[in-house]
Image (spheres, grey):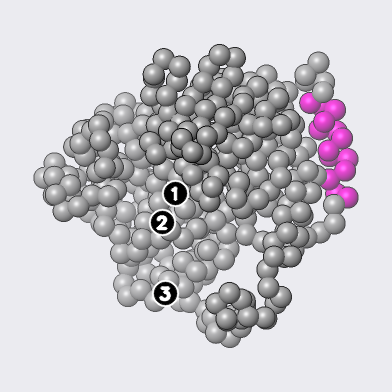
Amino acid sequence: MKRRAAALLLCFLLAFWLSLPPVHAADRVYFTAVGSYVLPLSDNTMPFWSGGYVYIASSIFTGAARETLGISQVLNNDQGRLVLYSGGRSLTYNLSASYALDNDGGTYYPGAIQRNGTVFVPANTVSRYFDLVYSVIEVEHGSMVWLRQPNYGLSDKPYADAARYPMNSVYADYIRAKEAAAPESGSPGASGRPSTVPESQDPAAELDGKRISLCFQAGSSASLLADALESYDAGAAFFFTPEEMERQGGTLRRLAAQGQSIGILADAGDPDRTVAQQLEAGNAALFRATCGKTRLAYIRGGGAQSLQAAREAGFRCLQPELDRSGHDLRNAAGAQELVRRLASWRGDAAVWLGDAASSPGLRAFLAAAKEAGGVCVAYTETGLR
């Protein structure tokens, strides 16, 4: 019955999605879908990546979406606490902590993140604990985070095709709302400057054979980024936390076979493990996956002491020329901005992107860099290769 209902949904949506009028292009976005519902699109509730995890707004566990997933939320801002519960099971998030607790006091990482008054939770943790399934799917206007029950009748691609009409509908509403809130073209914005810059003020950037090493914080999108690099015969470096290495053995083997560099991401602020312990755990997981080890590391939040300890253990610590982790590489605009920044840099450069890149943004950058004369190479234990 559920497969028949899903098939009917597919036929209905495919029949009508083309009826939506065209809208103006905007930055790529993240949709949220729950079961058969594509939820309204808003900057305040849009999913995002952080620390290798995709985060979703806890507010989706209300209304029809709550009924579809069978999960409810209780948010108490005064106490700084969020509780997700279903069938006698619960996850409690202390908004000032980096973890959640289950009924028995078990600890689940990572914790919730609060942005602009909205609480976000990691889709991975919630799905595993409450026996759900989630996917991050590349779609026309960006990506879609889709949560559903395990027995839902469609896989990712057919569902994305079926959901094109509701996605275009909520995207059109999103664009209209942004255009209504934005100043008219050419009129002064909040800064008193015109909202657009004449193209003549943005000359074409040239890279003139510069070697560029893109360095990523590897999460669930690592495989898609590897696809993009393979398409352009380009090299890069992927830094995994020990936990991600345990989860992504197949991706590690694929990256190793492709010739990409693999490093360990260690957090100097981890209260439970030293940097040395994290590096040891990362190499143990990497060896189980690939029968190889690495001496490449990125120490997040590490001072001179942490870096020195890693070096004494034989690791080369990435210290990038450019830290672009606060700048999205998720669309063509972000790609062109990175090319311009690299063009103004003297010499070769290692670029730390953190988790700010997506497959479409990376493809746009690789194409633009190639056209500008740049060469994307891997960052290794001996530097740019």
Mark 2 packing: few (<14 Cα in 10 Å), some, or many (20+)?
Answer: some
Whether pointer 1 and pointer 2 mark residues with C-beta atoms closer than 8 Å, the reply is yes
10 falls in the magenta region: yes
Amino acid type of disc 2?
Ser
- In the rendered image, is residue 253 in sight? no
Q: Nearer the viewer, residue 24 or 4?
A: 24
Tell me which secondary structure the magenta stretch mostly adopts.
helix
Mark 1 = which residue?
Answer: 355
Is disc 1 placed on a helix, strand or loop?
A: loop
Tell me if residue 356 comes above or below residue 278 in the rendering.
below
Mark 2 = which residue?
Answer: 325
Q: Position of residue 368 (x, y in %)?
A: 53, 66
Q: Position of residue 176 (x, y in %)?
A: 76, 60
Q: Position of residue 281 (x, y in %)?
A: 26, 31
Is disc 3 placed on a helix, strand or loop?
A: helix
Farthest residue in the front direction? Answer: 78
Mark 3 = which residue?
Answer: 343
Cα–Cα span, label 3 and label 1: 23 Å
At 41% from the left and 64% from the top, the residue drawn is 375
- Find the magenta span and give its range: 6-19
Mark 3 packing: few (<14 Cα in 10 Å), some, or many (20+)?
Answer: some
